[in-house]
Amino acid sequence: MRLRLCNCVAMKRTLFMLMAALAATTSLSAQDAAHAGDAKVPQLNESGNIVLAGRSVPYRIHRLPVSSFPDLPEQIADLLNQRGCAIPQTYEAHRPENVVHASLEHAGSSDWAVLCSVRGTVSLLVFFASAPEHPTVLATTPEKLRLQASGGDKPLGFNWGIDPASPKDVQDARSSMGRRPAPPDHDALADSVIDHKTIYHFYTKDQWTLLDMPD
């Protein structure tokens, strides 16, 4: 489980500046540029500059192909490739991430959640084992709105991460609440912004909700 701290004011300020910077100039690697006209060929590495607070700031986004996640069921991998998905990695990643296997529909189910990047837009997709051909889109956003400082003089990096959250993980995250709600009966999906806040998506009664967590 990722460690996340809440700094909502700073996050809102960063997002505001990034929204103003979507007209950024972008330089792709030679290989990516050669395929820029093909929607089904994902761009794996992207670097460039965006304008923040009146100055040009470099950024870098690293993505992995679907093939980097061999545990994905073949049907789901094929659907992701048909969409032209690449899997964006956070700037703190040390191993392939942002593909989650958990019991998200109900206890004991075998489900998957994936961050899928296509042409500058990232979507959070959930595939239930009961209907893998019909993924749910829980969130979608321009990729450049998910950039933030990654430490020192390094370029801005991608800050969105997803993880499985067991009932115990959820209750541990609620430890500071005076009266904790009853633990969920199956896994939730932790949706995090590095060094800011984690929210927990939970599927119950045929719909997705957000679990009550400490402020």
Image: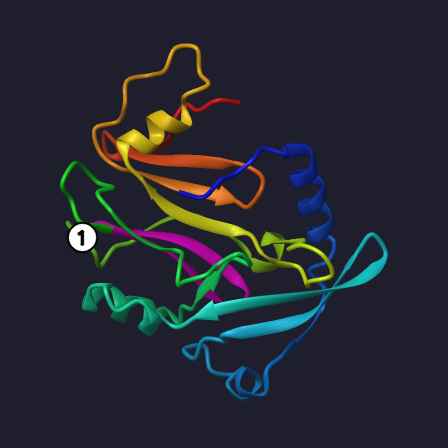
Image x and y of residue 142, in percent: 57, 57
- The quarter of the displayed image where residue 64 is located: bottom left
Question: Where is 93 relative to 44, above or below?
Answer: above
Residue 140 in sight here: no
Going by the image, does 25 lie left or right of 147? right
Q: Amino acid at mark 1?
A: Ala
Quadrant location of the N terminus in the rendered image:
top left
Residue 48 in sight here: yes
Magenta-highlighted residues: 112-128
In the image shown, does 108 or 195 lie closer to the viewer?
Answer: 195
Q: Residue at x 64, y 55 (%)?
A: 150
Q: What residue is shown with label 1? A: 131
Q: In the structure shown, which secondary structural element does the residue marked by tag 1 occupy?
A: loop
Image x and y of residue 168, in percent: 29, 30
Please say whether residue 125 is one of the residues in the magenta stretch.
Answer: yes
Q: Residue at x 63, y 34 (%)?
A: 7
Going by the image, does 95 lie left or right of 61? left
Question: Where is 30 relative to 167, above or below?
Answer: below
Residue furthest to the top: 179
Q: Residue at x 25, y 31 (%)?
A: 204
- The quarter of the displayed image where residue 144 is located: bottom right
Image x and y of residue 92, in percent: 53, 56
Q: Residue at x 41, y 28 (%)?
A: 173
How packed mark 1 is, by other alpha carbons closer than 10 Å (few <14, some 14-19, many 20 or more), is few
Please say whether residue 9 is one of the residues in the magenta stretch.
Answer: no
* Magenta: main secondary structure: strand
In the image shown, does 6 or 22 lie closer to the viewer?
Answer: 6
